[in-house]
Image (spheres, coloured by chain):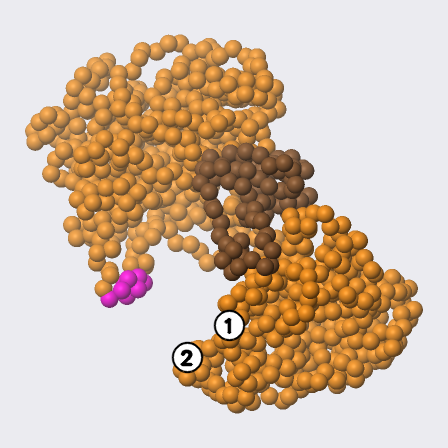
Amino acid sequence: MRRLAAGGAIDRTRPLGFIWEGRKLSGFAGDTIASALLANGIGVIGRSFKYHRPRGVYGAWTEEPNAIVDVALGARHDPNARASLVPLEAGMVVGGVNAWPNVRRDALGLIDLFHRFIPAGFYYKTFKSPSWGAFETRIRAMAGLGVMRPEPDRLLYDTRHVETDVLVVGGGAAGVAAARAAASAGLGVMLADDRAAWGGVLQAEGGVIDGMEAAAWAAAAVGEMRGATLLGRTTVFGAYDHNAFGLLEQRRDAAGGWAEERVWLVRARQVVLAAGAIERPLVFPGNDRPGIMSAAAVLQYVRHYAVLPGREVVIATNNDTAYATAAALVAAGASVTVADARPEAPGRDGLRVRAGCVPVGTGGRHGVKWVDLALRDALSNRERVRCDLLAISGGWSPSVHLHSQAGGTLRWDDAAAAFLPGVAREGWHLAGAVTGPVGLGAALGQGHAAGVAAAAALGRVVHVAPPETPARAVEAPIGAMWFVDVADRRQWIDFQNDVTLGDVALAARENYASVEHLKRYTTLGMANDQGKTSNINGIAALAAMTGRAIGEVGTTTFRPPYVPVSLGALAGMRHGRLFAPIREVPAAADHLANGAVMREYGGWRRPAAYLRIGETVAAAIAREAASVRQGVGLFDGSSLGKIEVAGPDAAAFLNVMFYNEVANLKVGRLRYCLMLRETGVVFDDGVVARLAAERYLLSPSSSHTEGVLAMLRAWQQTEFPAMRVVFHDVTAAWATFAVSGPRAGVLVGRLSSDIDIGDGALPHMAVAEGVIEGLPGRIARVSFTGERGYEISVPARHGAAMWRHLLGLGEDVTLYGIEALSVLRAEKGFILIGTDTDGMTLPADLGITAPLRNKAVDFVGKRSLLTPDALRADRRQFVGVLPEDPGFVPAVGSHAMVDGRSVGWVTTSCHSPALGRSIGLGMIEGGRGRIGETMEIFHLGKTSRAVIGEACHFDRAGERLHG
Amino acid sequence: MLRLPCPYCGERDEPEFRFAGEPAVRPGSDVGDAVWAAYLYMRSNEKGPHREVWSHAGGCGQFFLLERDTVSHAVLRALRPGEAS
Ligand SMILES: [Zn+2]
């Protein structure tokens, strides 16, 4: 065991059993999976992506590139969890990924022996002949890390939308100082930190603030803030336009059966970025073995988790921060040797410090066993030093991610050996280690100043004094070292994606000199750690290889998210039935009772067909369609759009909006009309009713109602603001039922109503308002089937009762659904917008040309109907299609072929009960001129023959409307 | 996610709004094909200060003119239809 006897923030009274690769292990509450594995002496916990090299824990938090594990607990499963980020829970089943049979003995580990043959760009060069597709299946099987489970994710997620005066990103010394100051000014403060406890690195580094132990000060300061929103375990993962932010809150502890992850979408007036910095690895040969860890991470494991990852330790560093790790290790009983790359390394009591010394090689198959050290100016003169832990520090990279995402600039600073934030966005204040190397005193001072500046920007004054900390010795400057200049170029830069110094050198040699090209070519920084440890080292190596300054090379673009965010969390509640709520018709329950198969059509759940016992859907459709032509059918048309248009200028306005003339429509009459876009393309069709001189009722397609309303509003407001006209969507206010068939009049005649439905008073295409069974309502003579038809509308809340009433009127009524209606309208050649038409269909293509010839006023889209393209003779035209084989129903989308060339396609097809054969509709070049001709129909390699005919297949004279 | 000022409702989040293109003056129907095609399809797509029509579709339903910098995303001003520009 490597657990220290005392110390740390773990709860030793709460041991937690868990499974690692089939073995029972134990950790404590407060552990992460990574700290528990280290405490149990587990060295190898993963394999690298490309070479399958053994990998151990490197980091202690979001920077971790290696420790990717599969974690399962109850309904939870994460195939690519990072062990350093997952709090340990009892019963967790944890396993390695990308390895078989296990991470210690991975069969594909042999790949590493062939590394010379698989450098960067290997795929691009090798798998191109005959095609990538010939290799893809096998390569995909070898690639990738964890494996998803096929079951749906049963976790709950939630989303919150909030505004705040000040968002403080980071709950370390600087962030807490800023939040504390802003809160004292009476501002609404939101403080977010991805750890469970406040204080950030103070947890491990310690110190004294305002006379208190530093972490205790942070907790107390946060506890005293009034009215602040405190978000622990919350990562600010994205900065978006106008100070919008995405936050991911892990709520495992608070969940209690409710959302485990919650995304906060925050709009902040002022922003304090105190995101800290991430330690970089040193780059040297063999630097990727298990047991080689970030020095800062080792400090956290020793102090925070009471784990001693090694007893015989070598620390390799080029800066002062690793000495805190050295001190902690010595205090914990380890023996420590420090190799400091700087010739003037500071001497320290109780430490063996080798100045000017760097690691040049390592050994140990499943964990580091030795490291070769050499003087930087005499690299061939090596000394082998035994060790079971090699802690490395290559300096610090400020976490400028959010600053850059928001559009803040960066500048390279040679003294700090880092990209530092340059100009920040408006309303942003940066504090702490994100601004560069700072001590605790400077971090607190910057944090307080940021809080003061944010408050001042919002007109407030801060009422607390800046926090105080005892002055410390000034740190010596970093001595930049980007790699070791030896022949061995297997010096890892990106541990997870296996990108070495040699790969960067190859990319530079092949002229991938842009950092963005380097990234794509080598996959540097593209793993799920997103280059947190590797990017700067990669940029520096590229600069050296191409003879440029690091600032000249620049960084890749920082993009959200800062940490991986699950798709479940981003979706929140918007999945399943809540993704796009389906609208229900008022009589929905009755349809189900009547045997309806319900399907979604244009956002509405509607009856597709009503099945009798033992009947198939196809049989039901045929029966329903035939019955409507023989007797009387009843159809629920409640979802059909209904937009009321009223005002003194309603007639004039609609006359501009519609292709057809509507101003001369008489009160009480209906007209079938097209609405065009300004491009002339048919946007929608529907029946326009004039209910009064200044009041119209439009019936757009069910799925087009919102679009039609938007178009009316746009034209009224932007082109005709002087016109006095208002619009009102009343779709949901009315239930509408269509009665259709030769006996429709008999059924409707049995309704108790003051509306005269005689053919004299209510001829085809007429409408009347009145009282129906005691309800205010309307009856319209209109037909979507070609048969005598009536549409009865009553208030929606009485819709179900009216449906039942119509069924009980003593007639033998056939209920018919959308599918039968589609057959009936296909028999009649009635177009369905978006099915028979597309984004290029003009009214003349549908054979509707009279308005263009006769209408006096300019209307939307008119000019577009007069262009040379609109007047081309070979435009696709709407026609009927009659297969030679009357039993063959061609697939929708089949090509219409003439002389071996596609001249259009089938848009609708079905079996017609009325004609006892298959029929179709189509859009065919110069189609009306080809009526009577035979063509070929081509679909999926099969060819058949059909005759081009009139779109209207049945009752061409329209006599049945009056029958 | 932009923060846009509706001239009627005040500042609201972008998802409430619908972009309605660049403002274009509708020519009469007696113009030539080239002028009509330019009105339909040609957009300036400026880099920098830019005029756009937006509608507060998820709010008051009103259309308005927005002046916005397409590089910095700074909102310069919002005008009701007919307001002095
Ligand atoms: Zn508004």
Tell me the colour chain B is drawn in.
brown
Residue A259 appears in view: no
Question: What span is in magenta?
Answer: A130-137
Q: Is residue A120 above or below residue A748?
A: above
Question: For residue A398: magenta?
Answer: no
Position above or below: A60 against A905: above
A47 shown above or below A199: below
Q: Position of residue A83 (x, y in %)?
A: 38, 40
Count of numbered circles in the view = 2
Q: Which residue is mark 1?
A: A872
Instruction: Looking at the picture, tell me which residue is in the foreground, A219 or A950.
Output: A950
Where on the picture, by quarter, is residue A321?
top left
State whether label 2 is within 8 Å of ligand 1: no
Nearest to the observer: residue A35 or residue A957: A957
Type of amino acid under label 2: Arg
Chain A colour in the picture: orange
Residue at mark 1: C-beta within 8 A of ligand 1: no
Left or right of A875, for residue A849: right
Q: Is residue A943 above or below residue A755?
A: below
Q: Residue at x 65, y 60 (%)?
A: A859
Q: Kindly report the distance in space between the C-alpha atoms of the residues bearing marks 1 and 2.
A: 19 Å
The chain letter under disc 2 is A
Please name the residue shown 54% across and 41% down the image: B51
| x then y, percent, for residue A790 | 79, 73
Q: Which residue is mark 2?
A: A901
Instruction: Using the rendered view, name the quadrant where residue A161 is placed.
Output: top right
Residue A630 can be seen, yes or no: yes
